[in-house]
Image (tube, rainbow, N blue to C red):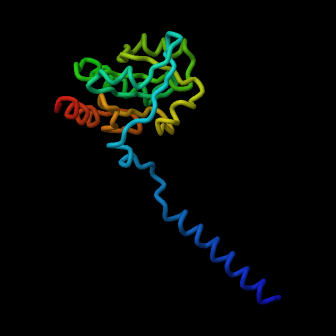
Amino acid sequence: MQNIIKIITVFVFIFILGIFYVSLNRSSNYDTETLVGNKLGEIKLKSFYKDKFYVNEDFENNKYTLINFWASWCAPCRIEHQYLMELSNQKNIKILGVNFKDKKTNALKFLKDLGNPYDYLAKDTQGKQSVSFGIYGIPESILIDNKLIILKKVIGPLNSQDLEEINKIIKNL
C-alpha cells in the first residue's frame, strides 16, 4: 500500500512540475501576428448617438476601415489622436471609433476639444463587446479591408510609424 502511495505522489509531483514548465515557457506577450490575415468575426456595436447597431454590412462598402478603441480618460488616446485626425483626411479609409467604458459627456468633450476623426462612432460602455475583437486594453486599433480581413493590429497608441504603414496599405489597392 505504501508503494502505491509513493508512486501516486511521484506522478502528482511530476504532473505539477510539467504544468509549471509549460506555463513558464509560454509567451506572455499578446501575439497579434496570428490575427493578421484572418477574417474579423461578427461586428455588432451600439451606435454612440442613435438606437442602432453597426454590423458587418456597414463596413463592406469601405475599401478600408480602421477600428479604433478609445476613451476620454485614456492618456495614450490623446497622444494617438493627431494620427487619427491625419488618417481621417484619407479617401480610401473610414474610421470606426469605439468609445470604451466612458461617460458620454466626457467622450463628447474629448472630441470637441481634439476634433472628431470618426466616420462611425460606437460605444462599449461595459467593455464586453471589445473583448470579442481581442481588445485587452486601450488604445488599440484594427485595420480591415472590405472583406473584413484583418490587415494590421496595433496595440497601444498609433504613432508615426503605424501611420506610415497604414498609409502604405491603403494606397496599394
Residue found 40% across the figure and 17% down from its top: 120
Q: Is residue 27 left or right of residue 16?
A: left
Tell me if residue 93 comes above or below residue 8 in the rendering.
above
Image position of 88 with respect to 6: above or below: above
Q: Residue at x 48, y 12 (%)?
A: 109
Quadrant occupied by the C terminus: top left
Side of 163 where 105 appears, left or right: right
Residue at the image point whose x is 73% and y is 80% from the top: 8
Image label count: 0
165 w.r.t. 121: above or below: below
Residue 122 spot, x, y in % from top left: 47, 19
- Vertical position of residue 94 compared to residue 136: above or below: above
Which quadrant of the figure has residue 10? bottom right
Q: In the image shown, does 162 or 8 lie closer to the viewer?
A: 8
Image coordinates of residue 85 in percent, x first then y, are 31, 20
Judging depth in this view, the residue of 147 and 84 nearest the camera is 147
Task: From the top left corner, tell me how far across and down residue 149 is, in percent.
Answer: 33, 36
In the rendered image, which quarter contains the N terminus?
Answer: bottom right
Residue 60, x across and y down, in percent: 33, 24
